[in-house]
Amino acid sequence: MKEKVKVNEQARLAALYEVSSRLGASLDLAEVLNQVMDAIIQLTGAERGFLMLIEKGSGELQTMAARNMDQKTIDGRSMQISRTVVERAIATKEGILTNNAQEDDRFAGQQSVVGYQLRSIMCAPLRARGEMLGAVYVDNRLFTSVFDNADLSLLVTFANQAAVAIDNARLFTQTDQSLSRRVEELSLFQRIDQELNKSLDLNHILNLALNWAISHTDAGGGSIGLMQTDDETEKRYLRLLVHRGAATEQEERDDEEILVPISHPVLEQVLAGEQSIFTRPVAPEQAIDGTPAVSQLAVPIKRDGMTTGLITLESHLPYAINDEEIAFVERLADRAAVAIKNARLYEEIQFVSKAKSEFISVVTHELRLPMTAIKGYNDLLLGGMTGPLTDQQKQFLQVIRRNVNRMQDLVSDLSDINHIESGRMKFEYEPFDIRETVNEVCDNMKEVIMSKRQSLTIEALSVSADVYADPKRIGQVLTNLVSNAYKYTPEGGQITVRVQERANFAEIAVIDDGIGISEENQAKLFTQFFRAEDQAVREQTGWGLGLSIVKKMVEAQGGEIDFESELNHGSTFIFTIPLANIKEATSIPT
Ligand code: ADP
């Protein structure tokens, strides 16, 4: 047992200064409480003591630190008077000193004095920022030592400083906890957003959202559904698309479709207020999917402020879902709403695009036959198979042929775009020497190029440059680019096709010194049906589809396309194709 050492005023202040300066070094609540308790014993020379804090919410006093006594003693009969002293110090917000509680007017009348040992007691409230945090209590047996007013004032002074340190540590712990909860939630939402946005499959999104809602709350089950309108009756209802009736471990009913009328009491309430409803207890008619539950949360999924769907969570416990969890599900519903909107838009686009693709397929097919017939008969006439023709008749037939050719080009371009966009274009991959394709294309184009008195040069590597792609499609790409160079370069111009190797790619450049492309038009290049307004461009036949097809074909085969151009100073179109030795070793695009 520690002897109390009486100290004079100066020594008291020195001791107070010394213990106070130690406070505040830590922000760990348990550590601060222990420091405070040790300091109090040291300062007052008390035999034993404890520190109690008022629990937020319940308002109950809880022992947070004690010296030379345990919880059982504190809760025991012999300490009843001590607890009364603590309660009084908290109620009056003042320090208490009593050397004989039995005879003390403040306590003598109380039952708690019964069975009480005579002790010298001191108690001081802990108060910070005007709020009562709790109290510190110390006592001594009378025959060892009694406290006096100077001891009490020392304890009260120290308790005030200790309360600040305790308050700081508590605040820090709270801020720290809520910050880490917030950080945790943010990173969780980041993951949720990623997952939700990765998918455009509506059912998958609904499943994900419901799974998160259930797993991050204590709900036993739930459902998610979207508002729909019946085409015939025009009645609105909630169609539950996913539900897990696990609240009372009901039978699995996952594939059963549940339609909830808007007259359903909970749905009606959500729709009227456009906000979440927590129901407890849940009457049978309030259960959204018919699963019996004790508590139920219904959170609207809103788009432009209107309820377009509902997440419901159920539990067989009355308090399973707290306010924080409700806020979480609300934020989740906001996120799900965006993903649902995207998925629905995607579904609509898919539908429209499929319809467009089918339409183009039918049209191009239906046009091909009559065009072949027109062209065939036209060629027969032009070839003199039906007798001699006048010059004018020949001229007219040539106009027909040019126009049919133009239509055939359009049909073939549209059909190519349709095939690429719908993923139906077949690429027959094989290793081949790109220089051969360049030579072939240039050979085919030579005649027309020469007719415009343009010169065509090939700058190819001396060694073979084997690429891995579809040679026919690469030929098509090259023909398109060389043909553009020819079309958009005036008479007497220069066209060069250069083959180089760069990293794991063959790089093919088609260079001309033609009309070039203005900066404004460069931004529109590769978009379908774009043609420059230029007189020189409009004089040439074309539909503005070639470059967009070229880009898609190159990219589909693992390459890239780029260009450089300056108005009136020519253009260079460069595309790449993976080299064969690299491509064979890695994945092959299909
Ligand atoms: P088209 O040649 O049928 O018009 P493209 O898609 O091949 O369609 O080209 C689109 C437009 O890009 C052309 O109309 C032209 O304005 C411009 N263009 C393409 N290649 C060149 C080039 N080599 N030089 C100048 N302009 C070009």
Image (spheres, rainbow, N blue to C red):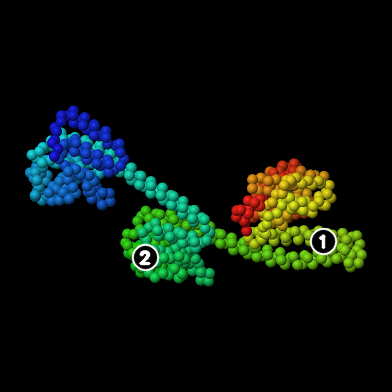
**In the figure, 320 relative to 451: above or below?**
below
Which is nearer the eye, 218 or 299? Answer: 218
Q: Quadrant of residue 549?
A: bottom right
**Side of 82 where 234 appears, left or right:** right
**Figure label count:** 2
Identify the element where label 1 is drawn.
Answer: helix
Q: Which residue is mark 2?
A: 247
Residue at x 84%, y 50% (from the top left corner): 451
**Dot 2: few (<14), some (14–19), or many (≥20) neighbours within 10 Å?**
many
Q: Mark 2 vs ligand 1: CB under 8 Å? A: no
Q: For the C terminus, which image quadrant?
A: bottom right
Residue at x 25%, y 39% (from the top left corner): 35
**Side of 494 where 585 appears, left or right:** left
**Side of 51 where 416 appears, left or right:** right
Q: Which residue is mark 1?
A: 400
Residue at x 9%, y 50% (from the top left corner): 114
Which is nearer the eye, 221 or 441? Answer: 441
Tags 1 and 2 touching, CB below 8 Å? no
Type of amino acid under label 2:
Ala
Front tag of 1 and 2: 2
Q: Is residue 173 visible?
A: yes
Which is nearer the eye, 103 or 372? Answer: 372
Residue at mark 1 to residue at mark 2: CA–CA distance: 76 Å
